[in-house]
Amino acid sequence: MPTTVIMPALELAQETGKVVRWLKAPGDAVTRGEPLVEIETDKVTVEIEATASGILRDITAREGDVVPVGRTIALILAPGEVGSAESTPGAATVRHVGAVASASGATVKASPLARRIAAEHGVDLALVKSRSGRIEKADVLAHVASQSASGAAPRAAVRLIAASPKARRLASERGLDVAALVGSGPAGAVLAADVASAARAPRPALVPAAATTETRGEGVGTVWRIMAERMTASWTSAPHFYLVREVNVSRLIAWRAQAEKAPGARITYTDLLVKLVAAAIVRHPRVNASWKDGAIVRHADVNIGLAVAIEDGLIVPVIHRADALQLSEIAARREDVVSRGQAGKLRPADIQGGVFTISNLGMYGVDAFSAIVNPPQAAILAVGRIADRVVAVNGQAVVQPTMMLTLSCDHRALDGARGAQFLGTLADLIEEPLALLS
């Protein structure tokens, strides 16, 4: 049975994806785990891997096409199998203006959650029945259940990988079984840091990847254009409010100095903030939410995004389950995803599932700023530089190192009181990190 290659759902609110470049041509042999196609999302361009080996056939989405999530874009045939684009469900021509067309040419209406679930299960939305005319989560699940009962469960060749290529390589080098490891990535995906932790061995040095060149149009890169569109949508749709707090960072500085004495990745203030923000979110779970379809959606995992500047815009790689990580693990993952992000080598799992973002401009000498919320998240923390400032201590003017924090909130998901309580807890943790032990 041919394995379908579908447009995957890489982000929470993603409805379509753009085919940037096919890395294999029709008729080429493909191996499970090797890059198959480059897909452009709302945030970055990522390489999608095949999870089946065989011959690539019946590519129905050309480079530049915008394709609905869950749509079949190619087949992978096992030796001896025969496929045809004309007989493949969902193999209709894809429109270039982002129209969501079904196999019959009609428009398919589906919720973002339904599209994500369809992509995860390899379901072509054109085959899903809906009584309301708009495909919802229940419709997709019912379709999957019916296919499973009939023995015709869909097979997806493109999905959220169970282990990253680097994780598989490290596991092989260290004699570990990837299937036996506990993954910290989305849907339990095993990441390189998981392998390193399991092996109790230092991570290999990162090799800088060659920089990629973005496709440009009229002088503006793709990433920059998408960033501009997303920030405009957030600014015009999300009612922002801002909370500002100045914190004493004397003990934060001492903590970093102590942490840097340990072997391993270099510890930065961003790493410390990821650790403290995650701890504060655990104590204030309402911050770990999104506004979606007229309701507040709460998230289980504490996944912290880091705003990273690149040549052509801004990307937000994610530190998954940051609340469960040691400081050294946070530093290693930050170093890994940031370096690969700047080199244009992020994987789908690297940008998925973020629930809160930290934007640190302190290294640029910025005292304070207000950031725009990264949709669909509820809040983003803007961090200024550490500077000696005159403050009052026991009624006396003294010089202390302080930092300005600005919390930008989406008022639909987070109100002022809850935002202030979260920021207060974070400020307390920064001023007294030992509170983490309690």
Image: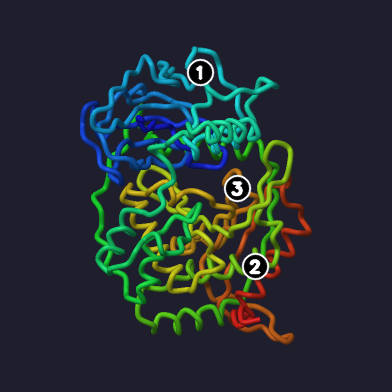
Q: Position of residue 169 (x, y in %)?
A: 27, 59
Query: Which tag, 3 or 1, sits closer to the chain's start?
Result: 1
Q: Is residue 213 above or below residue 108?
A: below
Instruction: Classify the position of the C terminus by image quarter.
Output: bottom right
330 or 136: nearer the eye? 136
Are there few (<14), some (14-19), or many (20+) residues within 10 Å of tag 2? many
Q: Residue at x 73, y 87 (%)?
A: 394
Q: Position of residue 304 (x, y in %)?
A: 54, 58
Secondary structure of residue under mark 2: helix
Give residue 373's mark.
3
Give residue 102's mark.
1
State how many labels appear.
3
390 or 186: nearer the eye? 186
Q: Is residue 301 left or right of residue 306?
A: right
Q: Position of residue 1 (x, y in %)?
A: 36, 30
Q: Position of residue 144 (x, y in %)?
A: 55, 34
243 or 167: nearer the eye? 167
5 or 334: nearer the eye? 5
Give residue 280's mark.
2
Of badges 3 and 2, nearer the viewer stands 2
Q: Amino acid at mark 3?
A: Val
Secondary structure of residue under mark 3: loop
